Amino acid sequence: MRGLIGVVIGIIIGGAVTFFALQNFVKSGQKDQKIHSSELPQPKDNIKGDIKQLFNIDTTVVSKMFLYKTIVGYGTLQHPENDLKDITFKISGYVEELYADFTGKYIKKGDPLLSVYSPQLVSAQEEFLRAFEYYKNMKNSPDPVLKKSAEDLYEAAYKRLKYWDITDSQIENLKKTGKIQKSITLYSPYDGWVMEKFVYLGSQVKEGKPVMRIAKHKNLWLITDIYEDDIRFVKKGQEVEFYFVSYPERKFKGVIDYIYPMMDKDKRTLKVRIVVNNEKREFFPGMYGEVNIKIPVGESLVLPETAVLNTGKRQIVFVQKEKGVFDPVFVKVGIYSDGYYQILEGVHQGMIVANSVLFLLDADAQLKGKYSKDKKMEMMHHHH
C-alpha cells in the first residue's frame, strides 16, 4: 500500500516539476527554438518535496469565534386538540334538515347546523305547555301551596327543554303560539369549519353521540421532529424561525410551546410543538414546514471545514511545522456551524494549519509513517 502511495506522490510531484520546467522553456524557446538536452533541468537525486511550493497550499489560523448551532426540523400543521369541538344532541331522533351539509364549510356562531325530529321532544313540549297553563291559572291563586307547586312544575319543564339545548327564544315562541314543534334545530355555539360530519339526511341521531366536529383554526400547531442527537439543545420557550413551502419567500417567528415526552422509536426523533397564529386564515392543517432553531453556543476555537480531514472515525488537521512542512494532529471537534468546526482538543489559538490539498498531505503522512502506533500517541498528546 505504501509503495502504491509513493508511486502516486512521485508521479504527481514529478509531473508538476516537468510541467513548470516545460513552461519556462517554451517561453525561452520563443527566442531560440534550439534546445539542447544538456540545457534541460536535471531531476534531483533526492526530492525532499516542498509540497507547499508545488501545490500552493493555502493555510489558515486557529482562531476564536462566537458560534451558533442551527437545528433544522420538519413538520406539518395540525389542529390543536383543544380547538376541536364536537356537536352533540342530548335527545334521540332523526335528521330532517342538514344545513351544514359538507365537510369544510365555514359556519358562524348562531348559524343552523341541522334539524332533528324527536318523539321525546314532542312529549317534552306537550308537558311544558300543560305546566305553563297550570302556572298561569295558579299565578294569582290565594293558596300558596298550589301557587308554589305550579311554579315548581313550570320551572322543571322549562329546565328540561333548556337541558336539551332548546333556546330561550324557541321556548318563548312555544309559549306565545302554543304550537308544538316536531323537530328541533341545533345552532352552532361558535365560529369554525366543519371538519367532520357524522350524519346525513335521514340518519338516526342518538343521545350523546356527536353529529359533527368543528374547528376554529384561530391557532394551529406546527408539530416538528427533532433528531435524537439534537434533543439536548432544545428547550421550551426557545425562539424559532419557520417557513412553509406555500410561502417560500416569507419567514415566520415563533417559540417552542411544548416538548412531547416520548420519542418515535423508528425515526429516532422527538416531537416539539410551535403555536402558529392563524387569525388571517392563511395557514391550513397539513401544510409542510421547515423549522430553524438557532442556539448560541458561545466563543470557541474554530477551523473552517476545509482545514479538517474528517473521516467519520477521526478528525485530523495538518499543523505547519516549518515552511512547506506539515505534521498531522488528531483533533476533537464539537458542533458544525456555517462552514466551521468547533475545535475542542488538539490545537490552540494562533496555530497555522493547512487549508487545502489535505488528501495529498494525508497520503504523504502515510508514506512517511506518521500514522504509526507511536506517532499516533504523539499526535494525540501533541500541541495540548
Image: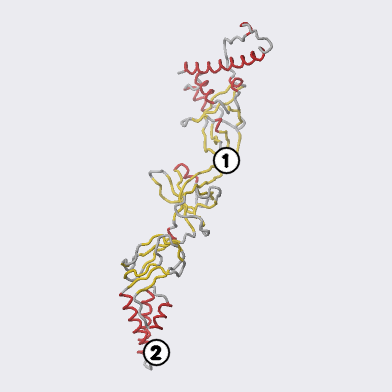
State which quadrant residue 16 falls in: top right
Residue that numbered label 1 is attached to? 67
Closer to the camera, 192 or 137? 192
Question: From the viewer's perspective, is residue 188 above or below residue 71?
Answer: below
Q: Residue furthest right?
A: 31
Q: Is residue 93 left or right of residue 353?
A: left
Residue that numbered label 2 is attached to? 139
Amino acid of disc 1: Leu
What is the quadrant of the N terminus in the image? top left
Q: CA distance from mark 1 to mark 2?
A: 83 Å
State which quadrant residue 129 falls in: bottom left
Q: Give the percent coordinates (x, y) of residue 281.
A: 51, 58
Closer to the camera, 9 or 366? 9
Secondary structure of residue under mark 2: loop
Q: Is residue 367 left or right of residue 127?
A: right
Question: From the viewer's perspective, is residue 187 above or below residue 322?
Answer: below
Closer to the camera, 308 or 19? 19
Q: Residue at x 39, y 70 (%)?
A: 186
Question: From the viewer's perspective, is residue 255 above or below residue 70?
Answer: below
